[in-house]
Image: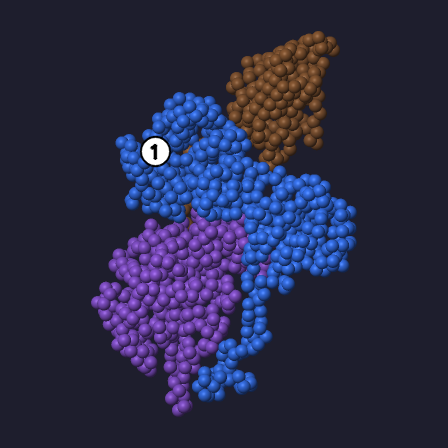
Amino acid sequence: MKKVWPKVRRNHLFPQIPPPQLVESDEEVALEIKSKQMTINVNFLQALTEKMSPEDALQALLDHGISHYMYCPWDFNTHLMLYSEAKKVLRDKRLAQKAASYFMDVVANTYCVKERETKIPELYRHLPKEGIQRILALLYQVIWGIDLGARGEEESIKRLSRIPYLEKRLWKESIKKFAKTLEEFLQKEMESEQKSSKKAQNPLGEHSIENYTLEEIDKGLREFASSVDDITEFRETVEDLKDELAAMGYTVGGMGRGAGNPIDADLLYYMKLAENYTLPIKKLPMEKSGALHPHSHSPWEVGKPVQDIDPWTSFGKIMPGLTQTWVRREGEVFGEMEKIPDCLIIIDSSGSMTNPRERLSYAVLGAACACNAYLKNSKRVAVYNFSDAFRGNKLILDFCKEKESIYWAICRYFGGGTAIDLNDVMYLLKQSEKPDIFIITDMQITNLEKLIDFFNSIENRVTAVHIGENIYAARFREGLKQKNNVSLFLVKDKEDIPKIVLGKVREYLSSPF
Amino acid sequence: MVLRDGYQERVRRIYRFISENFYLNRPDLEVKGEKYNSALLFGILTALYGGKELIIGEPGLGKTTSAEYISCLIYGIPLGVIWGSEVSGHPEQTEEKIVGRPDLGALNQGKEVVVWSNFVQLPVKIVDEINRLPETKQSMILDGVDRGNWEYLNEMIINDEYALFATANYQDRGTNTIIAPLVDRFDVMVESRHPGPNLAFYIGRRSRFDNPLRHQEFEERYHKLLRSQIPYKEKLQALEELSEAFRDYLKEKVGIESLSKEERFYIRKEMAQMPLDLDANAFLRMVLAELSFCHRYGQKRSVEGCPEGCHYTGYLCYHVKNCASNRLPISVIGYSQALAWFLEDDEVDLEHVRTVLPFTLAHRIQWRDSYISKKEGEGRNDPLQIYLAKEATEEIFHRYTEQRDYLLDALAIASRAFEGEAVEPLDGDHPIYEEIKKEIASLR
Amino acid sequence: MKNPFEEFRGQSTRSKGKELPLDRILKAKEETLNQILKGYENLLKNEAKDLVWLMQYSTVIKAYSIAEEAIKGINYAAEDIEEFCYVLDKTDQVPYLITGPAGVYISALCNHAEEEEIVLRLQDVGIKINLLGYRLPEGKRLVIEGNVGDFTGISLEGGELVIEGSAKNYTGAGMKKGRIIVKQNVGFNTGHGMTGGEILVGGRIKGLGKVVGGKIYEKGQLIFPSDDYRPYYF
């Protein structure tokens, strides 16, 4: 290992992974990767050394492991993407996991064979060739042009060999073709696993969520949330991996130990997506104290006043080049960050608004951005989620700092009529000192006039974001045009909501209260 | 081929000695399969290379201590003398306290004679809490160390070797900050970290009184010599002789062989001769391209924002506000060579550059808010600036691995084009390809 | 002036990685696809001026003969046809898509392919292509996984056409012999002008056309000829 590892590292441009460990195991698996740590099964290696040199075997295994890290899948986001695309075709979690795993193996191996001097072909020559491993060996024979001792013909090999495995930008389509072609073999493998109650083992290790650290998982989910077409795709994928995520200690609120709450995929989606729109933590402002005090010295020149001369540093002499004079500065004290107010989010979840659990709701995303920004500055957030409030279609969350509860409140969807109960709003406003208000709605509120009157009567900073131009919005604008503390934004492109919200938050956080 | 003349081993022994006895720490860096503490490693490299290091950290975590011990052992100067030569950062510091002052006796007789400070005379300079110095004084020190020249009352001292260690509080607090043009002059920035509760407990148990790096007699002789009015050149020679004697004492007392001036010069020469392999070379060019390129405005400028919808939003040029200075490649190459020398490698490779790069970048980059806000919540072991620099390095490295062969081809073709061959530069998505084209076009 | 790229001089032939058979396969695939695309563009140039194509008996026949001419000399396999279908879905590779000529072109490709059985996996193709299976000859079996558009299997000439999904209107119109199996539903005017052969629909038939001969089954039940549906005489 000491001889082979540095050589392999160099070949792969020095990946930042810890040196692999050797373990003795009875499993029929040569290599395992958990949170970047590779472990090589000594027993398996010894069995291989009857057919090939131990150095070559070890090099091949390490090449395989490192190219998963360096090339495919590289990160958890790519892993999720491959799994998600495979699932679209295969419609079964376990089949999709297998397909993604085998695809990653083919890509990683082919990359190594093409770009590096590797003993992977020799390794495969000596590995068992049953079931899908035989199909893959046949495939490798065709695409690498090397005899691996696999025999037989398969119609699907022709299709499989036409997939551009090394074109990363085409992986999304490639895995679908790969999965579709391998479907029957994957089914057979699953059936035989069910019959024998023994899982078919990939000799070069399975690919699962355990390959990644919690930080990588967190980052991967964030990137995946931005990359998917809609929330259902994210939800489906995360639901499939819920148990594994929970087992690793990953929760919606963040990473941590212990079981925590079960993962709500929709909440997680908005949380991760909102992380792409965050503001940095506000720095503690410095303010001038108004008092001058001696700060530093500067050389005295003829013509400058003499009252600030420091006789000690001037060695008792008054002459240019030697004499030093005090420079006075205003002192600085910490600013009043603690006076940043809390935030009340009023979100419309009536029937005319998008159901956030069915499609991406920019209204919810905007609310999530506001929530994140205030929480980051250690302020509290309250939520008033309404549809037809007078019929009970409302949710009130008092001011708190629990992110999960706030998101749950924001994501709630009633889908009914639209009427806001101002008593609820007044109640919430009393729970905090002049909180900022963010209201996101399409303005089709039945008691809009009352709302206008209400906003006219309060001095809180109000940001109203409304979707689409209509007479109600025009009425709202007209009714509040005299109020300096109310900003109204019309959003034509819903994608602008998070930017608008952030812009306003940024302004609020940097201006004096 | 690196000469295996034992200097690396001596330096490693110094590293181990400090690590085990004076600056107890936990390794936080791995390179070529070996683990090191970044503050200590880069401190030693700074002392050997003659660089400028900014050490940040919480109060009391050994920022100044690490620099003092490294200076003592690499330069063979007693600890008490090092202490006496430090400049502490506070607003009342004057040029007279930092650089030199007139001899008051001679001044009263109408003669201008300069009494130089120890800080200026010694090759290794430590400034504590540099950010508390007024900007004019910060600039004065950095200028002096950059050039090795110190002037006062029309007299001048020229240092033939120098290294600077400056400590500062975290740059993101509400204290004074070091302004960008000044912070750019530092080669590297490292964090001096908490060693963990167990080592911290052990530090607390150690005796404060028995420090083998102190020697009263040597220190007195040093101070006497430094105070004397003999010409600086002769003084340096005498200091070196004293240093030799102190080094013999160290070898006898603690078994550590410090380095003589000649040896340090020799090491620096060896370091400077260390070649860069092609990967390291190409990767660094890629980094510099991403940190200086602007498709719309010609180059990055801190006064010009990045427009939305730019094609290059996937690259670092979109996430940074300022342009990489020319000091950056000097620092990266210098420290990479130093690291490669330290590890007894034959050439500088990608791993050396990737290890060094974040520490040379961290203090120089001004990140856009959007990039900071995305990353600041992520779990990490480093302070935010260093973490962001490490993330940026990995991002660029990933891009490099994807297009390495093509980039090397592009650079090879550029070489031929530069020499007049009628070849067209290769196209590519990355800023480096545009920059290559600009170079070639400027010739034609 | 110093050459800033000096160190890279002579590195052009540095290891670019080996050339694998995979590269050759993909290159050949790319070339074949380009030839097929060129043929399709030629067809459009001739037949769909101003991007308008009228679905008429004569235009279909003419388009088919131009398509046959266009594909002469191209060495392709069933997978290439499938690839072409995928590419049709991507507007960045195909400047314009008109499903009529596209269907005729694909039919020509299928009819003249070397394989006797062709499987086209079109589940992920967003568009529903018309005129697939046009004049499928005897001895040929074409299986399409996914849904298809109008005029599927028209003028079938003895081949077997299997649609794993649904088809739209005028399925099997004018077919003379052969078999069309649609696993799910079909639209209106099914079997319009059909004179022989069989259409077997696993799901629902929205409506029959003016059927002359042959047999039509819905969910295993013979519905033509029957008491409710008698042969039509033009």
Q: Nearer the viewer, residue B299 or B16?
A: B16
Disc 1 residue type?
Glu
**Chain that appears brown:** C
Q: Closest to the observer: B89 or C161?
A: B89
Q: Callout 1: residue from which chain?
A: A
Residue at which label 1 appears: A27
Quick one: which chain is blue? A
Q: Give me the residue at 60% from left, 23% from top.
A: C165
Q: Could one spot residue B75 in this view of the protein?
A: no
- Specify the quadrant of the image occupied by residue B40: bottom left
Q: Residue at x 36, y 70 (%)?
A: B124
Q: Colour of chain B?
A: purple
Q: Residue furthest bottom?
A: B109
Left or right: A390 as drawn, with respect to B60 = right
Q: In x, y percent, where is residue A145?
A: 39, 30
Q: Nearer the viewer, residue A450 or A244?
A: A450
